[in-house]
Amino acid sequence: MLEETAQPTKSHAKTKTPIKRELGKPKSKLLVFFTLFTLFVITILIFVFLNISKKKNYVQTALRDEYQGKYDLALKNYNNAIKEDKDNMFAYFRRAILYHEQKKYDLALKDYNKVIAINPRYLYAYFNRAMMYYNQKKYSLAIKDYTNEIAVNPRHQDAYFNRGLAYSKLEKYYLAIEDYNHVITNNSKHKRAYFNRGFAYHILKKYNLAMQDYTKHVAINPENKYAYFNMGLIHNKLKEFGLAIYNWEKSISLGYKTLETQNLVKKAKESYKKSDNNIYRLRANIYRLQKEIILARKEYDKAIQFDPHDKESYYYRGIIFEDQQKYNLAIKDYSKVIEIDFNYRNSYYLRGVLYHKQKKYDLAVKDYNKAIELDPNNTNLYYKKGFIYRLQKKYDLAIKSYSKIIEINPNDKKIYPLVSRLYCKQKKYNLAIKNYDEAIANISINSSFYYKRGMLYYQQKKFNLAIKDLKKALSLGYGGKHLQSYIDRIEQKM
């Protein structure tokens, strides 16, 4: 930014009368002292200016060296900058990145720790340190850093995605799926989130959900040979040999021509010849993958006519009807699936969603309950059931559903405020406070919980406790000047 140049102020006083000198001897010693003192101050200022310029030049030179690929020189200049200023956060941070890229993880960690010590709210340091922990296979430490960053900046989608990867490495697939859900909600084109969520569902043997995600992934990224290979594995597991062959051959055509894949194709072809597969359904599934929905639906019609007990054709045709907002037809197909296979969990879930949309809440809850019976750790089912109970003002049942989510995943911070609000609607303020106590114990660095608990204390006229919580929220960055002003008003009332 250019600074505005100031013009020297001109004197407008007229000098008709000469200025008279004061009588007496001039104070020459005093004048000499002031002259020397002024020169000394100017010398000090010049020294400081040159020293500051020198510090800046080290960092600027190091950045230029990085850009030119002269990493050894860049490190040397960052070292010089740090030598001149032990709290030069930017120099530590850039040096940590260079160490990180050179896989000198111990040195990088030391610098990231220094950056965080200088500025505990510098999010990039947490994010980069978490990536480094991930590379070192220290997944729990990576998760902790990503969680701290998300607490301060809940909009950083890369932190959710990376934490999901770390959860997967620890085989905490449900937590990984929750993070991928968050990413996909905010970016419906995030191809890696679809693939990794599909992989998690695949491991959990939720094959229909895995297939949906892999399909969405290849719609965005049609050249991913691994996605087609994984889809082939699922189809083979479900004895859909024709589709398994189709996907594996697609994977081979994209470059995944391994001996394993070729043997799988060979065995699938042998099984396909012996099987009694519904050729119409196989063709319909291919059309569906190709987004040829009208052709797919016609083939599913033929498949059902050929085999009235073909549950998969009813299921996928139901999805097509749902996408076309033909909800009654979709419900009819999902009901047929359940009639054929009483334990087909996803049909209960999808039918429950449609009953929910039609405001047939009791039927929706009944289906969600059956889906929960088949998949008791699926937090999304409890959330949807709790949402219906809230609409029906059945607050105790809603609290029960939400509490089950907390029991499964105590780190799900969006649930705690819902439970406390429901307690407040029932005027059970002590239980609302107790719920926030639990939230604060389970979730680190969440300023909003301190704020909300403080406001509940204020409503109960427990001013000392209210001020304590509000000040804690303020120290964590919540509320700013407005909250400080509010605290001051409370303290004046006491």
Image (cartoon, rainbow, N blue to C red):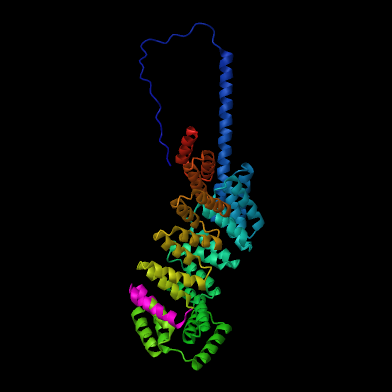
Which residue of the protein is positioned furthest toward the bottom in this rendering?
Answer: 274
Residue 459 drawn at (x, y percent): 47, 43
* Image quarter hosting the N terminus: top left
Residue 360 drawn at (x, y percent): 37, 68
Residue nearest the observer in this picture, 337 or 20: 337
- Can see residue 48? yes
Residue 358 drawn at (x, y percent): 35, 68
Residue nearest the observer in this picture, 214 or 365: 365
Residue nearest the observer in this picture, 248 or 198: 198
Q: Which residues are magenta?
A: 319-342
Residue 80 drawn at (x, y percent): 63, 46
Residue 9 located left or right of residue 238: left
* Residue in the image at 40% along x and 10% along y: 18
Is residue 226 within the magenta segment?
A: no
* Residue in the image at 44% along x and 79% along y: 338
Provide the major secondary structure of the magenta segment: helix
- Can see residue 320? no
Q: Quadrant of residue 366?
A: bottom left
